[in-house]
Image (cartoon, coloured by chain):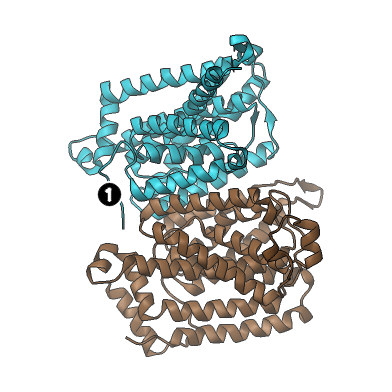
Chain colours: A brown, B cyan
Amino acid sequence: MKADFRIPLAVGAALVLAGIIAVGAPHVMGDYFVRILLLMALNSILVLSLSLSNGFTGVFSLGHVGFIGAGAYAAGILSLTVQQKKALLPHLPDLLNWFSLPFLPATLTAGLFAALLAVIVGYPLMRLSGYFVSVATMGFLIIVNVVLINASDFTRGARTSTGVPLATTLPWVIGWLAVTLIVLSRLVYSPFGRRMKAVRDDTIAASAVGISVLRARLIAFVIGAFFAGVGGSLYAHYLGSFSPNTFYFAMTMNLIAMLVLGGMGSLSGAIIGVICVSLLSEVLRSVERGFTIGDFTVPALFGASQIVLGFLFILIMIFRPKGIMGDRELTFGLSGRSAKNNHKEGKDR
Amino acid sequence: MSQFEYILQQVINAVSLGSLYALVAVGLSIVFGVLKLTNFAHGDVMMVGAFTTVLLIAIGVPFIPAMIAGILASALAGFLIERIAYRPIRNAPDVTRLLTSLAVTYILENLGILLFTSSPRNFPLPDMLNSSWQLAGGAITFTNINVLTVALTFVSLIGLGWFITRTTVGLGMRAAAEDMSAAQLVGLDVNKLIIVAFLVASAFAGLAGVLWAAQAGVVQPQMGFTPLLKAFVAAIIGGFGSISGALLGGYMLGALEIFIVAFLPDPVVPYRDAIVFTLLIAFLLFRPGGLMQPNREIKL
């Protein structure tokens, strides 16, 4: 079995498009749209990183946001200036308080930190299946939250962390999205990717034919965590100020909604899910603030947009549990014979 | 204050907290037992009961009838959730059902925010329940609401025990929990049994919600979240799906939390929840059936 290059080709085409948007958008569009575009790209990285374990390997983790939070805090601490560290985090250990990293190394370190955390957490937890792994990873998320709130020497506790340089720009995010897409598409549509999907579709059969279930799950979990950490760093450098509860259940719910809507077994589906949910919540949010048509005033209804999203989510679960894309990929017609064969094999299963 | 009185005070605290955990965990376990569903919406069903009670007290209804109405409102909420959201996906994979219950949580919490805003509201507890008992010259104190919590927990659990061992419907519910398709084969109306399970579990959630809010003194839309997470831990420690296990797990968790706060050094205390959830993970890994189902195997 050789890796399938057609889908990365389609990914490449998508990336050229994204690159043009990244460079051109700020010149053509207003700040508001650039911000939405940036958030979509950022959420795409996060949802793609989530899809690796939750979608392709069948380990439904509820703890992914823990890695995003860990990455955000790690990168935030690293990229504060020395003066800021002395002022904001006076008890920071000497090892960390004498230097300040630029954006890219801080982000890479955050990714590696999250990946290391995933190795430690995943090695025991990836032995679990079904809802047990969901509940256990949820426990991990809560532990991360408690630690972030209480390790105030590093994090300022429950107070808002501020002063992280606002380095995240649209080209940076699109660039990282490109890296994420390339790595994940090579991984998912490779022999190893087939092993991951085999583990998802039938764990017992997969281990019977000699696939190491633990290894497949762990690798997916760790690579997912790396990009979650990277995304966390981008998020931290986008927001500038955040608190431990930024990275908690609300974010978890949001990312899961995007993943499930788009389709859990598809990279392009993940991005489509992000786009749909982002646009929908943007529209709903403007409705939620209240508006006036003629003499008729609709009052502000805070929470209404989430309720609509929640109902939409349940409808998807009932009527289209595989999401918009299911296992299929959007290939812009670039898929050659190889990808088509893949598709057939998929049907035979 | 002597060492003995301090310890006795902590035991009282542990029993009071453990009762609340046990009430929530029992409801979670009933639903999990019958449907194999990790019902995240259970915490929000608590919230429905607590808010109903508070609103009724606010318009002048006395505490006890308001509490009963709150419990009924929770039962109704549980019934509707099962009917609208869970029944259509009853045979779907685990993950689909877990996600649906998360979505229900999301809807109910935001509905609460929409109707009542997310700021906490006062729980108007009658003075009679707020008055405290002081023993041993003030070394040991507890309030009537603590007494009421423990008493209602005992009464309701004895009632539940009678229901599931002595009535036809209760026995049917246990049969369905044991083996759904076998229960169907011998002619039990599984739909009806699941509805009963949800009504009972949600009534327990309602009772727990009212008592939790009464002890905390406030209600707010997200109030069900913390008890829900703790009840997950309790139910899994005891053995998820086992009612006696949920009971045992609830009291053990209550005791553990009070022990951490009362007897461990100060720097450790804020990490209480981290310790509790580490315990959860340890149980899932090494004893997934909890204390009551030692032989259950769920690895890989």
Residue B166 occupies quadrant? top left
Say which quadrant the N terminus of chain A sits in: bottom left
Q: Residue at x 71, y 57 (%)?
A: A242
Secondary structure of the residue carrying tag 1 is loop
Residue closest to the far left:
B186
Q: Is residue B38 above or below residue A164?
A: above
Say which quadrant the C terminus of chain A sits in: bottom left
Count the labels in the image: 1
Front in this rendered view, residue A86 or A165: A86
Kind of residue indicated by mark 1:
Glu
Q: Position of residue A115 (x, y in %)?
A: 52, 67
Q: Is residue B157 above or below residue B202?
A: above
Q: Chain of mark 1?
A: B
Q: Is residue A313 left or right of residue A291?
A: left
Label 1 packing within 10 angstroms: few (<14), some (14-19), many (20+): few
Q: Is residue A169 left or right of residue B14?
A: right
Visible residue check, residue A44: no
Q: Is residue B275 left or right of residue B160?
A: right
Q: Position of residue A207 (x, y in %)?
A: 26, 67
Residue A238 occupies quadrant? bottom right
Question: Which residue, given by chain and number where applicable, does mark 1 sit on?
Answer: B297
Front in this rendered view, residue A36 or A100: A100
Front in this rendered view, residue B30 or B297: B297
Q: Position of residue A321 (x, y in %)?
A: 42, 59
Q: Position of residue A99 (x, y in %)?
A: 73, 70
Visible residue check, residue B105: yes
